[in-house]
């Protein structure tokens, strides 16, 4: 491992590029990917090691890698994989918190044909065992601090994989129950592997398994090829214009595509460095941005909200950030975030790990997730089709074809799937489970035999061609004959005085069609239900205003900082299922009133007009 200096000369942030410049750079960097099929991302890391040498690559409080050090460490893991007989296409599972070594492991194993499954560090028990089992992995690498979670999953294995421990277990002395992989790889050379030492690997081969939410509640493993990794890293390197003077602040999970590949890989491709943090802290954020001298920040929309809610701090405008890149930054906080923290440029994008298309808001239009220029329409084959919320499926005409939405009409976004050899345009690589793959494909959409990827996201396009995210398909609900988008209701509620955080979802009411709106709120002492009702009256139609309120101490989030709705929806508005205060929008007094068991019984018995 190379030791590096963290200091670097401060440069003047570059002038914001034009949208056309950004598109051209991205096209140039990705146009050469197919020229040499054997040039994979691990190959690129090798090249970068030779080009940038001891320049910083991956930084953290725990460990740091120079470009040369990252290449050498990766080569050690390549030789470990070969020595263990990991064959081409065979999966090795990785369970490790955010740290630079994480990248070295998967880069090294995939360099010699192995596939690395990036396990969610929040999983435990049967869920963790399931995610390991569906890959068929013979080896699993587990960080010492996550061994308790792994041991909790062992009872659920039909066939237990071989465990490789990374790091010493605290309080366990010289625990020798499992071999220490971090010690084992030290015995291997970090020099470049000659072609004779490694099996042939091309961009068509599978590189990673990245887990996404499944229809059954259990995660599903999306297939990610070397081609996809190359496209992601080089496309974003072009759009962001990263160079050796850039440094990315990345606190997103490395087991997800954005944090683990897009944020890290794109900056490395440009010769810049990445600061890897284990978790996000609104309190320490600006101190760390300044201390590490970062010029880039990879966000999730909720992180931006947390920063805005924090008390003003003079440090928040003393940074050198030139660009914030990410997804989920809603229109209601975009300008406030950009203006308060003096962010020169925001690059919002839309993509999914397994999706066949992506969108980019290069122009920086507040609230939009992207626009497709005419000269790139062939590269991003996207359509928005009419969607029936009640049957949870796209609407078809008399001939059986899907119906394209008009401008500003809400529908499901779909992307045309192309066959092999399409050079990245419309590729859908599916999941390890073929049944899950089939569920995401919509067939005979506009012509017999065509196939389109279902995003499960509702969107609209405005008159200028900008796309806007509206809601997840399962989150939007129907009430009083109207569709209600939870995201739009949440935005209206969030601007009310006293509301700190909000999560909107639909709940079933006995004897009523559809689902009624309910909002789980985190509030401060100034919150008044009467003020909220008055606030929403002028902002939302009657059917969209939440019928029920739930006051919570905090809202649960996923590992990518998205709000959890399923558990709240299951609780419904039943006061027997929660100790949280509940309120009902009673039409008679025209006010939110306390919802107790007696009132709950009257609502369920149909005694009240809803």
Image (cartoon, helix red, strand yellow):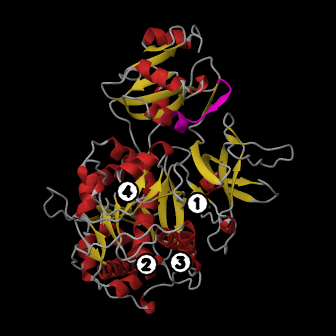
The boundaries of the magenta stretch are 480-490
N-terminal of the pair, mark 2 or mark 3, is 3
Q: Determine which residue is flagged by label 3.
A: 29
Q: Determine which residue is flagged by label 2.
A: 42
Cα distance in 3D space between marks 2 and 1: 24 Å
Residue 526: which quarter of the image?
top left
Residues tagged 4 and 3 counted as in contact (Cβ below 8 A): no
- Residue 479 visible in the displayed image: yes
Residues tagged 1 and 4 counted as in contact (Cβ below 8 A): no
Q: Determine which residue is flagged by label 4.
A: 252
Looking at the image, which residue sits at the far right? Answer: 399
**167 or 333: which is nearer to us?**
333
Residue at left offset 75%, top offset 42%: 395
Which of labels 2 and 1 is toward the front? 1
N-terminal of the pair, mark 1 or mark 4, is 4
Residue at left offset 66%, top offset 29%: 482
Badge 4 element: loop
Residue 508 picture location, percent across and down: 56, 24
């Amino acid at each position: 491992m190379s030791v590096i200096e963290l200091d670097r000369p401060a440069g003047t942030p570059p002038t914001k590029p034009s949208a056309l410049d950004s598109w051209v750079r991205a096209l140039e960097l990705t146009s050469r990917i197919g020229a040499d099929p054997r040039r994979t991302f691990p190959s690129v890391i090798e090249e970068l090691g030779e080009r940038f040498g001891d320049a910083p690559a991956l930084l953290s409080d725990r460990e740091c890698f120079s470009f040369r050090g990252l290449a050498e460490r990766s080569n050690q893991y390549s030789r470990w994989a070969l020595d263990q007989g990991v064959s081409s296409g065979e999966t090795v599972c990785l369970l490790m918190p955010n740290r630079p070594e994480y990248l070295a492991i998967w880069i090294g194993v995939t360099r010699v044909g192995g596939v690395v499954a990036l396990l969610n560090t929040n999983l435990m028990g049967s869920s963790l065992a399931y995610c390991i089992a569906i890959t068929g992995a013979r080896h699993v690498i587990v960080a010492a601090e996550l061994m308790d979670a792994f041991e909790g999953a062992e009872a659920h294995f039909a066939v237990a994989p071989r465990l490789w421990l990374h790091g010493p277990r605290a309080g366990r002395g010289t625990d020798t129950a499992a071999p220490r992989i971090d010690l084992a790889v030290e015995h291997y050379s970090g020099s470049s592997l000659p072609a004779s030492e490694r099996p042939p690997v091309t961009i068509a081969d599978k590189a990673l398994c990245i887990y996404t939410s499944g229809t059954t509640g259990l995660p599903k493993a999306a297939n990610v090829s070397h081609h996809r990794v190359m496209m992601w890293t080089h496309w974003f390197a072009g759009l962001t214009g990263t160079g050796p003077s850039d440094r990315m602040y990345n606190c997103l999970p490395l087991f997800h595509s954005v944090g683990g590949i897009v944020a890290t890989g794109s900056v490395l491709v440009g010769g810049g460095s990445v600061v890897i943090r284990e978790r996000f802290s609104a309190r320490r954020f600006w101190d760390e941005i300044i201390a590490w001298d970062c010029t880039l920040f990879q966000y999730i929309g909720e992180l931006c909200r947390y920063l805005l809610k924090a008390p003003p701090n003079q440090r928040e405008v003393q940074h050198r950030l030139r660009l914030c890149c990410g997804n989920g930054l809603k229109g209601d906080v975009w300008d406030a975030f950009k203006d308060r923290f003096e962010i020169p440029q925001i690059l919002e994008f839309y993509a999914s790990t397994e999706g066949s298309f992506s969108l980019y808001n290069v122009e920086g239009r507040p609230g939009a997730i992207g626009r497709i220029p005419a000269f790139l329409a062939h590269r991003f084959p996207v359509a928005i089709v009419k969607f029936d919320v009640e049957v949870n499926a796209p609407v078809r005409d008399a001939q059986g074809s899907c119906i394209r939405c008009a401008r500003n009409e809400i529908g499901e976004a779909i992307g045309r799937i192309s066959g092999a050899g399409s050079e990245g345009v419309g590729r859908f690589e599916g999941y390890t489970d073929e049944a899950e793959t089939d569920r995401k494909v919509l067939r005979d959409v506009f012509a017999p035999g065509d196939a389109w990827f279902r995003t499960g996201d509702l969107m609209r396009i405005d008159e200028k061609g900008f796309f806007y995210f509206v809601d997840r398909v399962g989150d939007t609900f129907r009430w009083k004959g109207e569709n209600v988008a939870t995201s739009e209701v949440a935005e209206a509620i969030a601007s009310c005085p006293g509301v700190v955080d909000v999560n909107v979802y639909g709940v079933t009411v006995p004897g009523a069609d559809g689902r009624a709106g309910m909002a789980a709120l985190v509030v401060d002492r100034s919150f008044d239900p009467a003020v909220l009702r008055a606030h929403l009256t002028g902002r939302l139609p009657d059917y969209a205003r939440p019928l029920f309120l739930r006051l919570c101490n905090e809202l649960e989030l996923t590992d990518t900082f998205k709000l959890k709705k399923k558990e709240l929806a299951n609780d419904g508005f039943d006061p027997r299922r929660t100790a949280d205060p509940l309120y009902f929008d009673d039409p008679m007094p025209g006010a939110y009133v306390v919802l107790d068991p007696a009132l709950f019984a009257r609502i369920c018995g149909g005694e009240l007009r809803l």
